[in-house]
Amino acid sequence: MKIVTNVPEELLKSNADEATPGSASLIAYAETTEDVSRFLKEAYENNTKVITIGSHTGLAGATYPQDGEAFLSLELMNQIIELDEETLTLTVEAGVTLNQIREYLSTTPYFYAPDPGAKDATVGGNASTNAGGMRAIKYGVTRDNIRGMEVVLADGQILTVGSKNRKDASGYALKDLFIGAEGTLGVITKLQLEIRPVLAYELSLLIGFDDLNNLAPVIFEILRAPISPVALELLDESSVKHAEVYTQTKMTNQAGRSFLLLTVNSNNQEGLQLELENLEQVIQASGALSTRILNAQEAKAVWHIRDNILNGIYAASTTKMYDPVVPVNRTPELLIKSKELGEQLGVETAFFGHAGDGNLHICILKFDMDDDQWKTVLATYTDKMNQLVASMEGLPSAEHGIGLEKKPYVKYFFDEGYIAVLRKIKLALDPKAILNPDRIFDL
Amino acid sequence: MKIVTNVPEELLKSNADEATPGSASLIAYAETTEDVSRFLKEAYENNTKVITIGSHTGLAGATYPQDGEAFLSLELMNQIIELDEETLTLTVEAGVTLNQIREYLSTTPYFYAPDPGAKDATVGGNASTNAGGMRAIKYGVTRDNIRGMEVVLADGQILTVGSKNRKDASGYALKDLFIGAEGTLGVITKLQLEIRPVLAYELSLLIGFDDLNNLAPVIFEILRAPISPVALELLDESSVKHAEVYTQTKMTNQAGRSFLLLTVNSNNQEGLQLELENLEQVIQASGALSTRILNAQEAKAVWHIRDNILNGIYAASTTKMYDPVVPVNRTPELLIKSKELGEQLGVETAFFGHAGDGNLHICILKFDMDDDQWKTVLATYTDKMNQLVASMEGLPSAEHGIGLEKKPYVKYFFDEGYIAVLRKIKLALDPKAILNPDRIFDL
């Protein structure tokens, strides 16, 4: 294990906001689970605070060092260990990236379902934030696609949680406790991922809207329909505009300013067509302005727009992105009220994301606003938007985590009694609080 | 809240084995969450040990009182609170039974997917053991069908965990921690259950075998096929025999001594037929003796046999039932080796259950064996079967829980370091260990 004190500069910055660079004492590059165990054991004895880092793609500031913490990097633990076709599992080290998995599985008839935006993210990082992505509506989030993990605790103890078994009523759900814990309870070193047979055909339906109020009944009908969409994405007017500029392409010519993009997949091509035709009728009757089953070329073009929304927004302006979730029936309300909030504050907003899960990405764009005003607008928007989401019984994070960035707003969602329970669990597993301390909640 | 000291006699017995009746000091019938909170607060202050009880259908002895514990019954908390069609959730009190839910939803287009055997079980009990059932292969186990819960901690603190939101990256997975904890971490008082639109059509395929070794490739092909079975059940020769005697009906006339019963469901009737016909060809090529797509009458008859296997076994003899799980590719090996173990010990075994999940129910039948011999056989079989499952990287319980009954065998599956972690979590949330103490593991 190599340990160096010159920590790469980009690790000292937060992806979550423009905080001034922090400081870290060193970075240790673990090559094995035993490296991790030894390093933590020593850190535990010396009360050294440790931040675990993968590809540094986190968006909630959970790995932003503030206090001279030590970095433990898992990027060298990047081996694919076993493809087990008989149990449909892929066992990997935690530093393996989504790109690596995709490439590895491309020569097999299988795929790994979770599809978060950052393909260079490590699966260990994905597990730590319970990352979501576009296919969650059909296949669940990262949590639902992990069968087992190896975890190292703060004192160096190596623990196996979960297994290749498909059912488990044998004690506490430790696996689920470490997933989404943002590195505060243990360091994930290996994962057994669930893989699935690739389906042969995909078909997409584009649904246009003028009035966002009409989104609600349409989403409702889609979720109740006897289909299981693999994606149900929202693209609002502003998002489409920025993606069009960025890609130098045009959305397909279809009535509407905002869109829902729905994709279904199956091995039965005619069945898919029939399903979407039936759904089209239901959707037209429930208030959509336009619907269109896309041919292969159109689908590729529209998905290219969807996939480049965030690139487009980032290219257009300094931006702050949020990832709240609300109960799915309140998605349009979240959209409309968050847009109004932007208008009140005089800032452009763009909305896109996972309408079928109640999980919208909200972006506010600075453009040429002066820095002081932006700072004020940012603080006000963040606070009010979180209060809005809380009033709708939503959650501050659907897929990026709380980290340091969202910690000030957690109080709108959870009372002190709830946080006290989190704290008890944290201190039960990490009594000296050396692992990513003060992320998610204060100790 | 009514509190009485004459505890119903059946609650003093274990469903898991023939242990002598235990003792309990009292039973409190909570009518509200506040009742539960007040009762626990007082129990906590007085160091009173508390066993939470629903319908007393548990099969692992988790609610078997040994030590003069107090019972906290939730059977009066049996109200269905809210059907929310827009988020597809049903909110219920923990004492509501599966039968009640089924009846309530029968007048709606929705159903609750988990389908454990005991329909008079409460959903609170189902959540506490993470109950499984036949539809888990498609819809997951109880854990996967609970969005949120209200839980009361040992000291009376009322906690809301999870929510109606479909995604959550906002802190630790507390909901998952309480599910499957067998009442040792808190008392579940309310649940938000996920409900689903009913699908219109079901079609079943019966697959016959002479040689159980041929099961493996067939299960493998089914799990890799582009279908999503709603059930994939095993019926072995002995199970079929006992069910036939009990129901006074005959299995459909089809070659084979053991069978796999596969059911698919969809709103597309022709699609189902086509899917099963394609699958039939694959299955025939991979070693099944016979296959047959059942007509409605045949399907009803075969499912009637399946649904009465356990009744048949119980009617035939004093019986011990196990619920182990192994990685799904090792299901046939578990079956064959467990059968051999029975033969070595001179005891009849019957096998049925959830072949698609690697979760077999293994029964050993006493018949006219004398009591002392039965005691020895039972102890030996239980010990060796658990060692066998552990050697196959399985788990002692797939859906009934550990309770008191399986606690002696936990050592074959988890080392002391793992148990120490469970203990830390238990004591973090219940420092006086008043809730179901010494269930799952020793304190």
Image (cartoon, coloured by chain):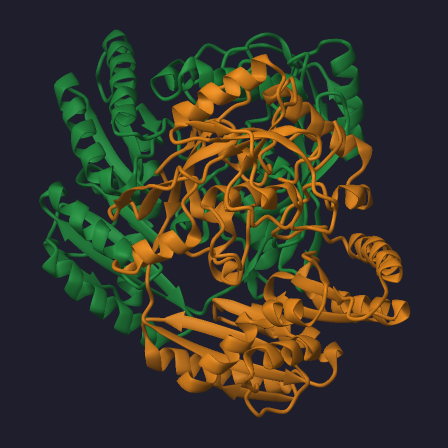
Chain colours: A orange, B green
The x and y percentages for residue A296 are: 40, 84
Is B434 or A74 nearer to us in this picture? A74
Quarter assignment of residue A381: bottom right
Is B73 or A380 nearer to us in this picture? A380
Could you tell me which quadrant the C terminus of chain A lies in? top right
Is B252 or B84 nearer to us in this picture? B84
Is A347 or B20 nearer to us in this picture? A347
Q: On the picture, is B348 further left or further right than A272?
A: left
When the figure is inspected, residue A156 is found, relative to residue B187, above or below; the finding is above
The x and y percentages for residue B22 are: 54, 10
Q: On the picture, is A362 further left or further right than B301?
A: right
Residue at the image point whose x is 9% and y is 43% from the top:
B211
The x and y percentages for residue B140 are: 45, 48
Residue at the image point whose x is 59% and y is 22% from the top:
A429
The x and y percentages for residue B441 are: 49, 16
Could you tell me which quadrant the N terminus of chain A lies in? top left
Residue at the image point whose x is 71% and y is 79% from the top:
A214
Q: How many marks?
A: 0
Could one spot residue B15 in this view of the protein? no
Could one spot residue A26 in this view of the protein? yes
Residue at the image point whose x is 69% and y is 30% from the top:
A422
Quarter assignment of residue A391: bottom right
Q: On the picture, is A276 further left or further right than A354?
A: left
